Image (cartoon, rainbow, N blue to C red):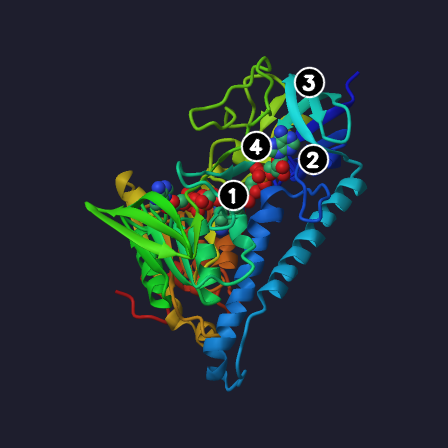
């Protein structure tokens, strides 16, 4: 008899959610994770809770409040005097949030009777997992099913070793003890834009070097253009088509050499963040004889249902194909738990939202206009600017717009693209609509509360039919 029905390796938002759902479904479940928190104790929650989604959003919020006080409070008649930032206190707040949340997951493990092992997990063969840790002898666990949820880590560039003193990865960039005077970032992706925004708001001069010729290549190009305009206005110096070739340490930081087209250029910065993507973590995860294969990107090879080629071995989240997003990892965890317990489950991978938590925020789901054109799918566009929204005016959030794409014949919503305040929340309405295969007409006929920013979603749906109320329809 096996020790467990399910053993999960990794307790990030993929693994811990999978473990909880397995336990809810009556499966005897264990979860293994090797993460050690800042307090030196084992910590669950993975990248997301410890060094990803949550701490970055904590710093984004602190820095946004600081900028708001400094630049905009006076518009409301609020005289805040000299505003200053206590970086140590800001980091303490972030750490407290992280600790409360990771402790919260540990408590959920206990209440769901999930057995937690602190240490490194290795799949020996189907049904057998070895746990190793510094303090204990190796343990062997047997289970009917194993879920691999080992997550991802930052990609490093050759010759630009991260020391978290001058050259930082995203984790180090959440821990700057002071605001650097000058900050270089390699990569204008999600992390470059979010963390670049944090430190710019706090006073750093930020230069982002991006190899691609355009910003946010996978976003709708209209949104990407607006984002570039807004970020430049704020003072984020984003240099496109710039490939970093070498970094040399200097007395005051480092010198970053790059190719801008044909030209060799360089900048000197106090600190440099390398944010050029993430790659799956599989070190020591798979015994060479376990039979589980990796794909060309080093991700665990799975089918559409997250099953590996070995019966009873599954893999989810950042460790497998698809976008590296916490909610994608969690939904795959739930789906695999249900497949194990009841034989079926469903996720629509085409309706996974993306959000970038800059100001303005950027969010999208489904097809972009460029993708519809390439696939020769006829469509209509519904656009609505926040500048025409009463609530947006009242809360100083008039930048940006909502764009809804609907099939020209079917009227089904095929994509929603948003830039503006709170679009991280508004996008979920579009996700729900698309999951229900709603039409633009369905959204247009849904009563939205007034005054809310969500009325802009309603108006964009009306605009898809040329009948927005608060703008001139062309
Ligand atoms: P992870 O969260 O990486 O967890 C994997 C876990 O497995 C880790 O705890 C690790 O210790 C453990 N592990 C690995 N190998 C072993 C082993 N052999 N034995 C034992 N344990 C092992 N996504 C969003 O959706 N929204 C955001 O706002 C967002 N912000 C981000 C900000 C930053 C700065 C970063 C870096 C990432 C952000 N992400 C965000 C991405 C998100 O964090 C990941 O997509 C998500 O954490 C993936 O979840 P996961 O469970 O697959 O892997
Ligand atoms: P990314 O893939 O979003 O962006 C990396 C950028 O670096 C790309 O634009 C790429 O063109 C550029 N680049 C690559 N090599 C380069 C080079 N040599 N010189 C200059 N530019 C180069 O990766 P990221 O920003 O590191 O984030 C990793 C992943 O973490 C994201 O893709 C996402 O899955 C996840 N994440 C999500 C969120 C969120 O959901 N809000 C936030 C942070 C991270």
- Is label 1 within 8 A of ligand 1 (CB to nearest ligand atom)? yes
Q: Earlier in the sequence, mark 1 or mark 3?
A: 3
The mark nearer the N terminus, 2 or 3, is 2
- Crowd band around label 1 with a 10 angstrom C-alpha radius: few (<14), some (14–19), many (20+): some
- In the rendered structure, the answer to whether residue 237 lies left or right of residue 139 reads left
Residues at marks 2 and 3, CA–CA distance in whole angstroms: 16 Å
**Discs 2, 3 touching: Cβ within 8 Å:** no
Q: Position of residue 201 (x, y in %)?
A: 46, 66
* Comes first in the chain, label 2 or label 4: 2
Q: Secondary structure at mark 4?
A: loop
Disc 1/disc 3 C-alpha distance (Å): 28 Å
Image location (x, y in percent) of residue 283: 56, 27
Residue marked by disc 3: 127
Q: List the single residue furthest toward the front.
A: 251
Instruction: Compare residues 218 and 152 and report the one nearer the observer.
Output: 152
Upstream in the sequence, badge 3 or badge 4?
3
> Does dot 1 land on a helix, a strand or a loop?
loop
Q: Are marks 2 and 4 in contact (CB under 8 Å)?
A: no
């Amino acid at each position: 008899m096996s020790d467990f029905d399910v053993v999960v390796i990794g307790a990030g938002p993929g693994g811990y959610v999978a473990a909880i759902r397995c336990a809810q479904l009556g499966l005897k479940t264990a979860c293994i994770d090797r993460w050690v928190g800042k307090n030196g104790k084992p910590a669950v929650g993975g990248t997301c809770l410890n060094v990803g989604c949550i701490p970055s959003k904590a710093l984004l919020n602190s820095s946004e409040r600081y900028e708001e006080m400094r630049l905009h409070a006076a518009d409301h008649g609020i005289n805040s005097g000299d505003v200053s930032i206590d970086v140590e206190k800001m980091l303490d707040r972030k750490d407290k949030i992280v600790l409360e949340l990771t402790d919260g997951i540990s408590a959920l493990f206990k209440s769901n009777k999930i057995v937690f092992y602190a240490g490194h997990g290795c799949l020996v063969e189907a049904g057998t997992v070895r746990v190793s840790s510094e303090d204990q002898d190796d343990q062997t666990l047997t289970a009917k099913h194993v879920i691999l949820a080992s997550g991802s880590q930052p990609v490093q560039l050759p010759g630009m070793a991260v020391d978290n003193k001058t050259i930082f990865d995203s984790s180090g960039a959440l821990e700057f003890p002071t605001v650097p005077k000058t900050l270089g970032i390699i990569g204008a992706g999600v992390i470059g834009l979010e963390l670049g925004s944090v430190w710019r708001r706090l006073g750093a001069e930020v230069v982002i070097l991006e190899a691609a010729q355009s910003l946010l290549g996978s976003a709708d190009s209209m949104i990407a253009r607006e984002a570039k305009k807004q970020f430049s206005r704020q003072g984020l110096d984003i240099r496109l088509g710039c490939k970093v070739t070498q970094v040399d340490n200097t007395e005051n930081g480092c010198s970053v050499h790059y190719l801008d087209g044909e030209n060799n250029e360089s900048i000197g910065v106090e600190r440099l963040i390398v944010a050029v993507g993430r790659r799956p973590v599989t070190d020591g995860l798979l015994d060479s004889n376990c039979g589980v294969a990796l794909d060309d990107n080093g991700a665990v090879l799975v089918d559409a249902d997250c099953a590996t080629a070995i019966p009873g071995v599954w893999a989810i989240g950042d460790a497998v194909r698809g976008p590296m997003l916490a909610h994608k990892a969690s939904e795959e965890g739930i789906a695999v738990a249900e497949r194990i317990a009841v034989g079926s489950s469903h996720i629509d991978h085409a309706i996974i939202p993306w959000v970038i938590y800059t100001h303005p925020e950027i969010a999208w789901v489904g097809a972009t206009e460029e993708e519809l054109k390439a696939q020769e799918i006829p469509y209509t566009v519904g656009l609505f600017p926040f500048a025409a929204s009463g609530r947006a005016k009242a809360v100083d959030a008039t930048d940006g717009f909502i764009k809804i794409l609907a099939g020209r014949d079917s009227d089904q919503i095929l994509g929603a693209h948003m830039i503006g305040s709170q679009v991280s929340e508004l996008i979920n309405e579009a996700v729900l609509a698309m999951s229900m295969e709603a039409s633009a007409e369905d959204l247009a006929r849904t009563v939205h509360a007034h005054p809310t920013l969500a009325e802009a979603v309603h108006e964009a749906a009306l605009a898809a039919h040329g009948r927005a109320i608060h703008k001139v329809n062309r």
